[in-house]
């Protein structure tokens, strides 16, 4: 296919374990394994084998400094300086840490502002932090409403930034519709009202560029197993704006310590001067390992090139859907305009669950989101235009022949 021949990233596909038997469009849920990530895991197993306890300070990737080293690698992906970044924890744990650090109810300012389309884990974390402070989530978690059930309007979010809001937490890209929120404008509006603001970048990191420092965002957090291809349960990330550094975090542990002080074993913490302070305990070294290889690929390819390819792929996918599938009652629920479209396309259909099962049986891996959503993520690093074309052809066949009727319209345990 001509589009693939012209693709300047086509060689990158060979870095990954892609199967010719299937078309993988679920890289926004769990990215594929790269050969470099695999090598990195083997290399860290080797350092355990060869160095034992000395692996903390010896070998190619001394474990004691690995979280900071990988934090640096996030820098071009989120647009922040190395000291503002750390690889640590998991998304939900990191959100708890950041809420414990940045949610400081004071006088009339006691509420947290989120949105009604947010991912459940983030909502649960915010509710439990409110409860820990003795507030009822019913009246203290304010959720911005969506007009169309899929997207949020900047003006609606800004209108909700009232003088009783103590903290704002929003996604960078919405996990269903893939809408990109205007982080820059929202941050400015929040700061004009004296409210700190943070973003969940799970669906945007590795897919679109960010400029967190320039936008003056207070904090951000993300997982690394979606677009960053770190593997199941890989260690997540935190960004804290430099103006907030040098303090004790809300949840401290000995890894929050300045590195040179940690083994003094004192009972008074000297927090790390950088975002390393937001670590709690011993890093999950074997779950950091794949990121050594995987983030190297991002450094070489560059996020701008990945974004350009991703837009070309979703442009092509949207065009094909509009032409080939128009008679089959699909609704495109992701934004069509490029500036607010993230790395995946979101379709809704009353038979979405059974359609996803039929796609899977035909070797195409989509992502079903209850109750009626289909996410399709052609990933810039490893998907091809031909795969996008084939997907729509297979989907058309499934609809024409009503193959989906062979499957129950219900979700599996993992959907
Ligand atoms: C994937 C995702 C999570 C997952 O959180 P974990 O702690 O890694 O399980 C949380 N929030 C959002 C928005 C996500 O997309």
Image (cartoon, helix red, strand yellow):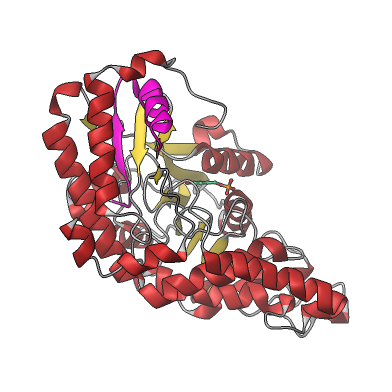
Q: Nearer the viewer, residue 395 or 103?
A: 395
Q: Position of residue 375 (x, y in %)?
A: 36, 38
The furthest residue to the left? 323
The answer to which quarter of the image holds residue 254 is bottom right
Who's the residue at 35% across and 19% down the image? 404
Q: Which residues are magenta?
A: 342-363
Q: Quadrant of the N terminus?
A: bottom left
Judge from the rendering whether residue 252 lies leftward or rightward of residue 337; answer left or right.
right
Task: Look at the picture and state if 124 lies above or below 102.
Answer: above
Who's the residue at 64% across and 52% down the image? 93
Who's the residue at 65% across and 58% down the image? 89
Q: Position of residue 276 (x, y in %)?
A: 64, 73
Q: Nearer the viewer, residue 109 or 197?
A: 197
Who's the residue at 59% across and 33% down the image? 136
- Please say whether residue 362 is visible from this viewpoint: yes
Task: Look at the picture and state if 329 lies above or below 11.
Answer: above
Based on the picture, tell me whether residue 104 belongs to the magenta stretch: no
Judge from the rendering whether residue 166 lies leftward or rightward of residue 273; answer left or right.
left
Q: Position of residue 217 (x, y in %)?
A: 41, 65
Based on the picture, tell me whether residue 350 belongs to the magenta stretch: yes
- Please say whether residue 262 is visible from this viewpoint: no
Number of numbered callouts drawn: 0
The answer to which quarter of the image holds residue 312 is bottom left
Judge from the rendering whether residue 15 lies leftward or rightward of residue 52; answer left or right.
left
Q: Nearer the viewer, residue 223 or 403?
A: 403
Q: Position of residue 215 (x, y in %)?
A: 35, 69
Judge from the rendering whether residue 60 lies leftward or rightward of residue 315; answer left or right.
right
């Amino acid at each position: 296919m001509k589009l693939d021949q012209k693709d300047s990233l086509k060689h990158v596909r060979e870095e990954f374990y892609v199967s010719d038997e299937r078309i993988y469009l679920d890289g926004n849920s769990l990215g594929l394994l790269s050969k470099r990530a695999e090598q990195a895991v083997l290399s860290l197993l080797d350092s355990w084998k060869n160095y034992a306890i000395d692996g903390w300070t010896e070998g190619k990737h001394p474990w004691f400094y690995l979280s900071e080293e990988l934090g640096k690698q996030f820098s071009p992906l989120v647009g922040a300086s190395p000291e503002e970044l750390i690889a640590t924890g998991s998304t939900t744990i990191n959100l708890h840490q950041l809420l414990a650090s940045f949610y400081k109810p004071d006088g009339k300012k006691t509420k947290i502002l989120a949105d009604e389309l947010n991912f459940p884990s983030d909502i649960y974390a915010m509710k439990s932090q409110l409860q820990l402070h003795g507030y009822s989530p019913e009246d203290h978690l304010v959720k911005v409403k969506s007009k169309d059930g899929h997207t949020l309007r900047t003006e609606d979010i800004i209108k909700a930034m009232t003088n009783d809001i103590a903290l704002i937490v929003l996604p960078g890209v919405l996990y269903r519709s893939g809408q990109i929120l205007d982080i820059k404008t929202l941050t400015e509006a929040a700061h004009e009202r004296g409210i700190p603001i943070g973003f969940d970048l799970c669906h945007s990191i590795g897919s679109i560029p960010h400029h967190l420092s320039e936008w003056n965002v207070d904090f951000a957090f993300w997982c690394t197993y979606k677009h960053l291809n770190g593997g199941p349960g890989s260690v997540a990330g935190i960004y804290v704006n430099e103006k907030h550094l040098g303090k004790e975090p809300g949840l401290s542990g000995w890894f929050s310590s300045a590195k040179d002080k940690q083994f003094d074993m004192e009972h008074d913490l000297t927090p790390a001067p950088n975002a390393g302070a937001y670590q709690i305990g011993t890093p999950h070294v074997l779950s950091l390992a794949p990121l050594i290889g995987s983030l190297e690929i991002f450094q070489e390819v560059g996020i701008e090139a990945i974004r350009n390819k991703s837009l070309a792929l979703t442009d092509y996918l949207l065009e094909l859907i509009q032409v080939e599938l128009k008679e089959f009652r699909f609704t495109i629920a992701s934004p069509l305009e490029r500036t607010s479209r993230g790395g995946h396309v979101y379709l809704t259909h009353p038979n979405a669950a059974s359609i996803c099962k039929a796609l899977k049986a035909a070797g195409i891996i989509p992502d079903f989101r209850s109750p009626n959503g289909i996410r399709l993520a052609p990933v810039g690093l490893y998907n091809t235009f031909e795969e996008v074309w084939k997907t729509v052809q297979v989907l058309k066949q499934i609809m024409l022949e009503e193959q989906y009727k062979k499957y129950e319209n219900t979700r599996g345990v993992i959907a």
